[in-house]
Amino acid sequence: MKNFVALLTDFGAGDNFVAVMKAIILGINPATTIIDISHDIARHNIKDAAFLLMSSFSYFPKGTVFLAVVDPGVGSNRDAIAVKTKNYFFVGPDNGILSLAAGKDTIEKIVALEKKGFFLEKVSSTFHGRDIFAPVTAYISRGTPITRFGKHLKKLKEIIFPVPRIQGNTLEAEIVYQDKFGNLITNTTKEQFLNFVRGKKFIATLRNKRINKIYSFYAQAKNDEPFFIEGSFSFLEISLKNKNAAAYFGVKGNEKIKITIT
Amino acid sequence: MKNFVALLTDFGAGDNFVAVMKAIILGINPATTIIDISHDIARHNIKDAAFLLMSSFSYFPKGTVFLAVVDPGVGSNRDAIAVKTKNYFFVGPDNGILSLAAGKDTIEKIVALEKKGFFLEKVSSTFHGRDIFAPVTAYISRGTPITRFGKHLKKLKEIIFPVPRIQGNTLEAEIVYQDKFGNLITNTTKEQFLNFVRGKKFIATLRNKRINKIYSFYAQAKNDEPFFIEGSFSFLEISLKNKNAAAYFGVKGNEKIKITIT
Amino acid sequence: MKNFVALLTDFGAGDNFVAVMKAIILGINPATTIIDISHDIARHNIKDAAFLLMSSFSYFPKGTVFLAVVDPGVGSNRDAIAVKTKNYFFVGPDNGILSLAAGKDTIEKIVALEKKGFFLEKVSSTFHGRDIFAPVTAYISRGTPITRFGKHLKKLKEIIFPVPRIQGNTLEAEIVYQDKFGNLITNTTKEQFLNFVRGKKFIATLRNKRINKIYSFYAQAKNDEPFFIEGSFSFLEISLKNKNAAAYFGVKGNEKIKITIT
């Protein structure tokens, strides 16, 4: 059966880090097809990587092996792990990066990567993506059971994905990701939002600017009028037609936003 | 027979948009090979995408399926289409993005994408690249005839590619694209240019700066001397040796340039 | 046997230059798998490309064909060459770009690319990556012996990789590359360094700032304290924990650094 490997890192495409990992994977499993999720995660931003992985994995063919490496602790005593879930495999450092995706697909087994026979001969202290994770990923894609890599672990390190909170007539949402268009992705689904507002008018305030519209598609919006929309990540996003909402609001990184029924 | 899919979007490589489209394509047709043309088209710049597609398609193996998505009207009532040309297939929104390439290869058939059985189960109003175009592209690459996707359309929306105009001893060219090196690609071929100047001297003026040389290769030019050259797109380009001509001239986007025989 | 092609250029991913080369390669050899090393080499920086190629090739499966194009002299009288080494093939302009990698793997044969039957029908003076190098690369990946492309050459143009120099109690190292994280890669291996300092204290000075620590992995370092570390390229690097060392030191491009035993 055709087998796929997907890569997600903060290594960038300008150096040779990603290429070297691919070379190693294809050397071990020449028949696999490798798909890049992204290599442009902001340096060491484990949260963004975990969010992207969670938002991506279910579109891939069953059996895909996901290798995610954002790894500020490389060389220290953090564990390296492989996870078997209901439909997929996940490989990476045990720093939370795999937890949102693996948790969503139901974790079946977690192992520590310990058996050196599966690593490159020389293992550095700075690039486990190449020396440990790439070869292990390739072996999994070839069918090696993850139990052969090392001891069983009871759980992996988890990142908490914030849930929207409702108090009275206010819903407190949180911005969890910003895409390249400047759309601000929240932690709140359209369903959660609609169940909350129930057809009434609402006002949301972010950095002293207001949002009081929700649209179904971009072309509905007026120019320079910020709005909510159910975006590509299946969450409500704050958008600005043909413009960069993050720049408009002056928002960087995670931030809370209160939506009040009026 | 080995089959190829080529992708062209303004989605960027930093988020997971492109990866998710690839995942869906490979899930439906695991044997296809996907080639990225570019994902760095400036946001919503349909013209640039149409130009790049026109300049690229003929180098690909016959039968390649091109999926091009720059889609500011996603979710509105613009059509989604598939086009069969003499040698290729093109898929995308009906906003002109496919028209230059498809027109050049001779259009044989155009259909609207309507049959939901070929789409993802849930179709969003913000990401048809994933929900409609990716699966349809994959089915075409597997051999599904495009007539199965929906009703026949008589024509597609067209973008006009400007033609150079000659009046007396002046040729009015137009800059239609700027590449990453800052070369300014015009709408005029070397043949058109040479037929016009017929060995005489010429002066072109762009933003108060002059060009009066044409070279065959970059190393012929002096430093800091702008010149015309037949570039990679088979059109005359305005270049500056080892430098960025767009920055030198202060040019952004399309602009006209008059070339006068002296 | 499965065959691989690896690409390294300064063409960027935003235009269609790389895509067109891939289209031509896959048209000639549909079964090959293409791996991007990088397309973000700074414009015309042959040295950076040669360094990345040298640092990458040995991780690839034997028989991989490397196509490296950073080619300011395209169209002039510089040779186009193919090189067979002990385990690999290298294709590109004869401007030094191939020399560090090919030299490291032991050169067996060098030929000039002359036989037009292996090129595209129309060869431009501005894009040999497409017109000459891509098709030749594809033919090599299909098994065509390089001797069929043209006459034997005795040697290729070489880039000199600087060696660290020891004088008394000072080692003069040189920064040869900067990665996307801002790590400054030197020409000195950890072994060379340790043999030099032999357990004594040392001070290195770069732009009036000091380095007097060497660590095994990033997490050992304190914040805002620059240090040496054996990095991913198997050379000592100058790093700053979670920060950009190049920005900290204000270093651009190659620069010498003196390490003195105290």
Image (tube, coloured by chain):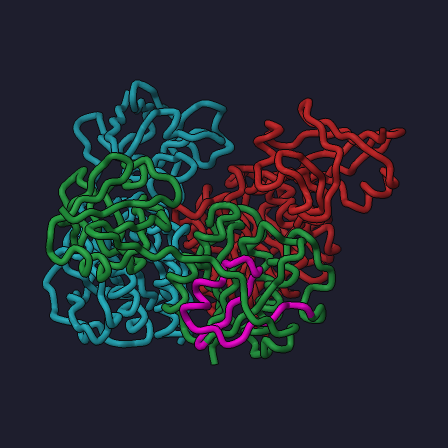
Chain colours: A cyan, B red, C green
Between C157 and B107, the one nearer to me in the picture: C157
Taking the image as shown, residue A199 lies to the left or right of residue C21, namely left
Q: Is residue A24 left or right of residue A77?
A: right
Q: Residue at x 69, y 53 (%)?
A: C125
* Residue A105, percent from left and from top: 25, 59
Can you say whether C198 is above or below B249 in the image? below
**Which of the 4 image quadrants contains residue A99?**
bottom left
**Tally of marks:** 0
**Magenta segment, which residues?**
C86-114
Q: Which residue is at a point 26% across and 54% down the rendered structure image?
A: C166
Q: Is residue B131 visible?
A: no
Q: Nearer the viewer, residue B215 or B122?
A: B215
Relative height, residue A60 to residue C176 (above, below): below
Find residue A92 and report its image quarter: bottom left
Name the foreground residue: A208 vs A130.
A130
Find out whether residue A154 is within the magenta segment: no
C100 relative to B205 in the view: left or right: left
Q: Position of residue A175 (x, y in %)?
A: 28, 35
Q: Position of residue C229 (x, y in %)?
A: 22, 53
Would residue B73 be visible to someone looking at this image?
A: yes
Q: Residue furthest front?
A: C168
Determine the image quadrant of residue C80.
Answer: bottom right
Image quarter in which the N terminus of chain A is found: bottom left
Query: Can residue C94 be found in the magenta stretch?
Result: yes
**Is C183 left, or right, of B97 in this rendering?**
left
For the point 39% across and 67% down, which residue is it?
A: A23
| Position of the C terminus of chain A by quadrant | top left
